[in-house]
Image (cartoon, rainbow, N blue to C red):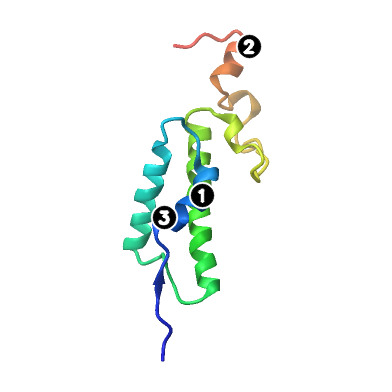
Amino acid sequence: MDPEIEELDWLDIEQIIKPIIHVWVNGLETTWAARAWKALTTARLTGYESEIERTTCVLRAVALAGLYREFCARAFDERGLTRGLARRPRRPNRSVPANRRIHTRSARRARGHRGR
């Protein structure tokens, strides 16, 4: 007889990822995460038959939270959001000559370059 497939619901996951995903005061990130979890549920990625599969589901939730934090850090220039998370070191684009590389606005301003 096959074990019964159980579903990891949002209420269980919310308590796990809330400390990771909490970014804004208004709490809208929780709404986003709930919608993302619903999409995973629709795709049948939140069911489990064993503790190993349950752990996989929990890791999916943690990955969603990490994705959201990384997006906010990059989209809204919130560098402090990724503090403590594993980050890959940034390597310069060596395929483009140094004098032709695209630089950030702040670096251009520091060199006295005016925007268009």
**Residue pictured at 64% horizontal, 36% vertical:** 83
- Of circles 1 and 3, the one toward us is 3
> In the picture shown, does residue 73 fall above or below 13?
above
Q: Of helix, strand and loop, which one carries label 2?
A: loop
The spot of residue 102 in percent (x, y) is 55, 26
Q: Nearer the viewer, residue 47 or 77?
A: 47
**Residue pictured at 41% horizontal, 92% vertical:** 1
Number of numbered labels in the structure image: 3
Q: Nearer the viewer, residue 72 or 18?
A: 18
Are the residues tagged 3 and 2 within 8 Å (C-beta)? Answer: no
Question: To which residue does mark 1 refer?
Answer: 17
Question: To which residue does mark 3 refer?
Answer: 11
The spot of residue 4 in percent (x, y) is 40, 80
Q: Nearer the viewer, residue 15 or 37?
A: 15
Q: Earlier in the sequence, mark 2 or mark 1?
A: 1
Question: To which residue does mark 2 refer?
Answer: 111
Structural distance between the alpha carbons of marks 2 and 1: 42 Å
**Residue pictured at 53% horizontal, 34% vertical:** 73
Q: Nearer the viewer, residue 20 or 74?
A: 20
